[in-house]
Image (cartoon, rainbow, N blue to C red):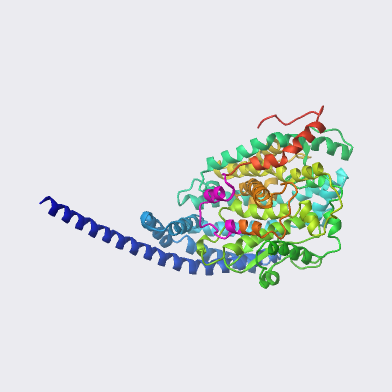
Amino acid sequence: MKKIILLITLVILFSSCKHENKNGSAIKNEVQSFLENYSTVYKKLKYESSLANWDANTHIVPGDTINAYKVQKTKEALANFTGSNENIDKAKQFLKNKDVLDVEQVRQLNVILYKAANNPEIVSDLVSQRITAENATNETLFGFDFKLDGKSITTGEIDKVLRESNNLNERLAIWEVSKEVGIDLKDGLEKLRDLRNGTVKALGYDDYFSYQVSDYGMTREEMLSEMKKMVKEIWPLYRELHTWARYELAKKYNEGVPEYLPAHWLPNRWGQDWTVLVNVEGLDIDAAIADKNPEWMVKEAERFYMSIGFDALPNSFYEKSSLYPLSADAAYKKNNHASAWHLDLDNDLRCLMSIELTTDYYDTVHHELGHIYYYQSFSNPDVPLILRKPANRGFDEAIGSLLGFAAMQKPFLDEKGLVGSDIEIDVTQNLLKEALKYVIFIPWSAGVMTEFENKLYSENLSKDEFNKVWWELVKKYQGILPPVERGEAYCDAATKVHIIMDSAQYYDFAVSYILLFQFHEYIAKNILQQDSHATNYYGNKEVGEFLKSILKIGANNDWRTLLKESVGRGMSAKPMLDYFAPLMTYLKEKNENRVYTLPATI
């Protein structure tokens, strides 16, 4: 009898398992059909929206409403689809059975819900208003007519004065001009904040900042903690650089040493990059490329990527991109902020730039092509369309920054004939110049920008305190003060494009610089076996294979796992600190007997 009961039990269990497997298989098939249908429609609508947005950024005509209308309609169509109740309900329902689904399917469903949260149908009026507001502020920012003494000037001309002029009166005048656009953007920023928060709250997010952070699989508190940790770790070195800059700039301008750095003394509108304060003798990229043309610069960067094993860019890249400045008599304007575009999540790859023959743009071009090659790498049949995006947004920026960084190291420049191989450069001065880009950037990105946007979105910062809070953070993290009184009529934060566009994501750049040094350390030690301060990636296919292993899977992975598998550890600032460790001794010697004004810890 016991044997019969056991046999019956086994039959029942076997039948039950067969039934469960059949149901599991049916559910997976149903999910797959949904994902394929979603992807087809999404790709079409995404491409139409991207094309309209491209036109709106490359052909800005004051008073012309055609581009704005197209952007509005195509964005609304995409928003209506991604945020539809039907897609939200299906994704949620399918995820109730995630234990029987493939991990790739679960990832796609989660991305679908993430996209939906920015455009939920249940608050469609808010979504429409937000799109309208974004278009309006975009046109205000990039269509603004900067004027000095009644004469229109470009942002490139503003930046040139701040890089090159030794006349403090001229610098102050141009700095003030650079902030004028913020006056026109202040009301728009408040409106954008309220609409963005209202939109994502409909699907359970506390605020827009928390929503953007969630794309990392992190909470707002976790991201803020990570950013504070970054700043704290690099602070001793930043404090030395800040002290050095105060004394060196006072000497340059023949002024008394200031307690904090006046903003117009610095070579960048936001004080985020101080590299031009140091001239490394023998390392003159500007002179080396002076007889080139802008197209050469793009082709040169492409040759670098091809040398390590990547494919040539499609012809359409050159045909469709907007790479060069507009002529002085052009009847329209364009967005001058360099960016890379993946319009159709396939092969329509473009860059929007205004290339000039400068060292900065040499770096920028290599950086932007890094984005393009990332997009090209994960545009393959093994990556579902919905997961054709970087492992996280910081990874995207890190790859571009890494190749721009590598292209500036002396052995690489020797290889390319941009610096004579017989010329010796001052290694310490070169390290200082690099620190004035990479180290200086961390308190700005992880501190000022991240905390301001957290306060803006998560703490509902009052419009009457936008400028006050902005300059409090700038003083705290950068040790910079405005050169003149900046009342609440101004909105100096809004002059930074990322506050208006790509908002609540600036920590991406901080993450990218941390990852950059992790990737570079691994490549230098384990592949090239070269000093990390003097590497040459050019022509090394093993470097290319390492990068491809990171890029080709897109977001079809967990980024933490990918990072550990790639470099052997999680996210850490230690490789950056190790790289710049030799600089500390030099700075401490230079700053001996000087007064430090930043606190020892933050």
Horizontal arrangement in the rendering, residue 307 relative to residue 508 (left or right): right
| Residue at image point 65% right, 42% down | 575
Which region shows up in magenta? 548-569
Horizontal arrangement in the rendering, residue 455 relative to residue 117 (left or right): right
Where 194 sits versus 77, above or below? Answer: above
Q: Nearer the viewer, residue 560 or 142?
A: 560
Q: Position of residue 441 (x, y in %)?
A: 70, 44
**Residue 491 in view, yes or no:** no
Where 238 sits versus 387, above or below? Answer: above
Q: Nearer the viewer, residue 19 or 196?
A: 19
Q: Nearer the viewer, residue 463 or 289?
A: 289
**Residue 410 in view, yes or no:** yes
| Residue at image point 64% right, 35% down | 232
Where 282 sits versus 67, above or below? Answer: above
Quadrant assignment for the C terminus: top right
Return the residue found at the far left.
1
